[in-house]
Image (tube, rainbow, N blue to C red):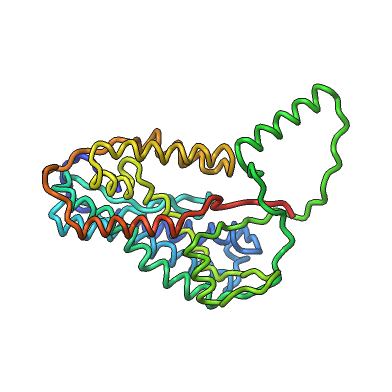
């Protein structure tokens, strides 16, 4: 959710609908390309089962993202803040097929209570949809033998530290004409999804404790729900004009920028020593989002106790969605 100054154009509902349809198509295709075992290169090669799985992934993901933005939209309208309907952002071929959805807020937020309501409504509404989807999907998933995978190390294999070490080793080997190291057998690359506290709890609730050496082959909607939790995690970080940044500003005012800088420092440590993938979000938060926040219209209006409890609930949601390594690719 971003706050911008803009004129009030007439709603163009066809634009919102077109972007939604396009995003259904791009997320449908991305599931087939990256999460389905067969990789069709034409529609004629897509089996009915694959199409159903891809469509269930697409609709589940867009339901979570759309509900998140509609939470912002409805609470903004409740506080008489002029805003647009959600714009979905299709992303052909790459990632999960979308960059999410956004709304445009064209008015200043009236007070800190409204800022909490509007900022918290998105991630909480998204969770209300994501959690049942995850539970249903896990209940319809299959328990299988766990593959033999390498354990995590510190610094992480995908960390900037490890990448730099590997590059340095490669350069020194070329300079010294060292004999090449024997190559390990390679069967393929497997993507591992990080486990948050919420995912662990839902898995145990839906499937019970997993026996030693077992793992879960998940239903497609679980992947959609997992990405919903990741979006919630990223948005609840208390930085700038992210949802969590709105809550931090409502609590601490102009001092909130120090909280955002502390989060950036944590992201830097994770990038250096855990996984370099956090570096992208570090750049987004520090360079694009920034640490500042616009003032509300009535800064002296007190923050109600209920809104403080809502901020606490969002903090619990942030902790529940947190995962040090969201995605990890390992060679098998």
Asked whether residue 186 is in view, the answer is yes
Q: Residue at x 47, y 70 (%)?
A: 134
Spot occupied by residue 70 in the image (x, y as percentages of width and height) = 28, 60
Left or right side of 301 for 214: right
Spot occupied by residue 16 in the image (x, y as percentages of width and height) = 30, 56
Quadrant hosting residue 80:
bottom left
Spot occupied by residue 60 in the image (x, y as percentages of width and height) = 44, 67
Asked whether residue 13 is in view, the answer is no
Does 286 sit above or below residue 87? above
Quarter placement of the C terminus: bottom right
Camera-side residue of 222 and 212: 212
Q: Residue at x 71, y 34 (%)?
A: 166
Quadrant hosting residue 180:
top right
Camera-side residue of 52 and 271: 271
Looking at the image, the residue that sits furthest to the right is 179
Q: Residue at x 30, y 48 (%)?
A: 1
Left or right side of 76 for 123: right
Spot occupied by residue 293 in the image (x, y as percentages of width and height) = 26, 38
Camera-side residue of 272 and 138: 272
Looking at the image, the residue that sits furthest to the top is 175
How many marks can you see?
0
Left or right side of 311 for 77: left
């Amino acid at each position: 959710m971003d706050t911008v100054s803009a004129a009030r154009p007439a709603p163009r509902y066809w634009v919102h609908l077109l972007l939604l349809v396009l995003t259904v198509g791009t997320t449908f295709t991305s599931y087939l390309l990256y999460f389905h075992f067969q990789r069709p290169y034409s529609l004629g090669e897509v089996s009915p089962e694959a199409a159903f799985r891809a469509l269930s992934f697409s609709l589940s993901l867009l339901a979570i993202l759309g509900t998140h933005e509609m939470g912002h939209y409805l609470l903004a309208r409740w506080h008489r803040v002029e805003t647009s309907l959600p714009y979905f952002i299709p992303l052909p071929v790459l990632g999960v097929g979308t960059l999410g959805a956004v709304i445009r807020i064209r008015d200043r937020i009236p007070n800190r209570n409204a800022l909490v309501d509007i900022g918290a409504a998105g991630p909480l509404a998204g969770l209300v949809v994501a959690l049942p989807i995850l539970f249903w999907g896990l209940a319809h998933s299959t328990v299988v033998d766990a593959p033999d995978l390498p354990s995590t190390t510190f610094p992480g294999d995908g960390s900037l530290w490890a990448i730099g070490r590997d590059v340095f080793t490669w350069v020194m080997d070329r300079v010294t004409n060292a004999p090449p190291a024997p190559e390990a057998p390679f069967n393929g690359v497997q993507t591992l999804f990080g486990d948050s506290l919420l995912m662990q709890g839902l898995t145990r609730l839906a499937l019970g404790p997993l026996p030693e050496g077992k793992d879960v082959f998940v239903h497609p909607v679980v992947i959609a729900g997992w990405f919903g939790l990741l979006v919630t995690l990223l948005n609840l970080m208390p930085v700038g004009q992210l949802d969590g940044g709105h809550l931090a500003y409502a609590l601490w005012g102009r001092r909130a920028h120090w909280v955002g800088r502390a989060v950036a420092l944590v992201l830097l440590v994770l990038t250096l020593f855990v996984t370099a993938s956090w570096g992208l979000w570090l750049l987004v938060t520090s360079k694009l989002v920034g640490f500042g926040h616009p003032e509300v219209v009535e800064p002296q209006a007190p923050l109600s106790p209920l809104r403080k409890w809502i901020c606490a609930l969002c903090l619990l949601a942030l902790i529940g969605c947190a995962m040090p390594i969201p995605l990890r690719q390992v060679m098998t």
